[in-house]
Image (cartoon, rainbow, N blue to C red):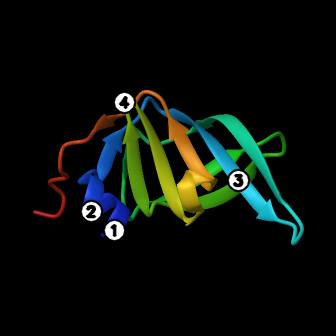
Amino acid sequence: MPAAAAAAGLTAVTTPGRGDLTMCRDWFIYDSCDTYHHVALPSRIAVGDQIPLVFGNSDKQYDFRVSGIHRHGDACMILSPHTGAHDSGEHIAIDPCKPAPASTAAR
């Protein structure tokens, strides 16, 4: 389990089925970020998941790997290995979200 998830104790959340995906590119001199709104998400997201996303005008496809979850009030930030310091860079913002009960699939 990544340190951020372990420190927060939050390893899974439920979602309303939509979120805002922010993706950034490093252009050597500056970073450029784009946010895609209303990206379809599964109803439950957990640390370690790989979420297939379809977004943008030309239906770009991307597998988003979940490395951590930060909760801020009723909203959550889903982090990837490409999320930068202070939650900048690649992430998914979800509002509202709630802690999910532990999965029984591993039992």
Q: Residue at x 57, y 38 (%)?
A: 40
Give above or below for 78 relative to 41: below
Determine which quarter of the picture holds residue 31.
Answer: bottom right
Question: How far is the residue under mark 1 from the one under mark 2?
Answer: 5 Å
**Which residue is denoted by mark 3 in the rendering?**
23
Question: How far is the residue under mark 4 from the one under mark 1?
Answer: 20 Å
Mark 3 secondary-structure assignment? strand
Amino acid type, residue under disc 3 in the picture: Met
**Which residue is denoted by mark 4 in the rendering?**
73
Q: Position of residue 30 (x, y in %)?
A: 86, 62
Q: Are marks 4 and 3 in contact (CB under 8 Å)?
A: no
Specify few, some or many for label 2: CA neighbours under 10 Å numbering under 14, 14-19, or 20 or more: few
Q: Are marks 1 and 3 in contact (CB under 8 Å)?
A: no
Q: Residue at x 48, y 33 (%)?
A: 17
Q: Earlier in the sequence, mark 3 or mark 2?
A: 2
Does 73 sit left or right of 23 as displayed?
left
Amino acid type, residue under disc 2 in the picture: Ala
**Which residue is denoted by mark 1 in the rendering?**
3
Q: Are marks 1 and 2 in contact (CB under 8 Å)?
A: yes
Q: Residue at x 37, y 30 (%)?
A: 73
Q: Which mark is residue 6?
A: 2
Depth order, front residue of 93/73: 73
Specify few, some or many for label 4: CA neighbours under 10 Å numbering under 14, 14-19, or 20 or more: few
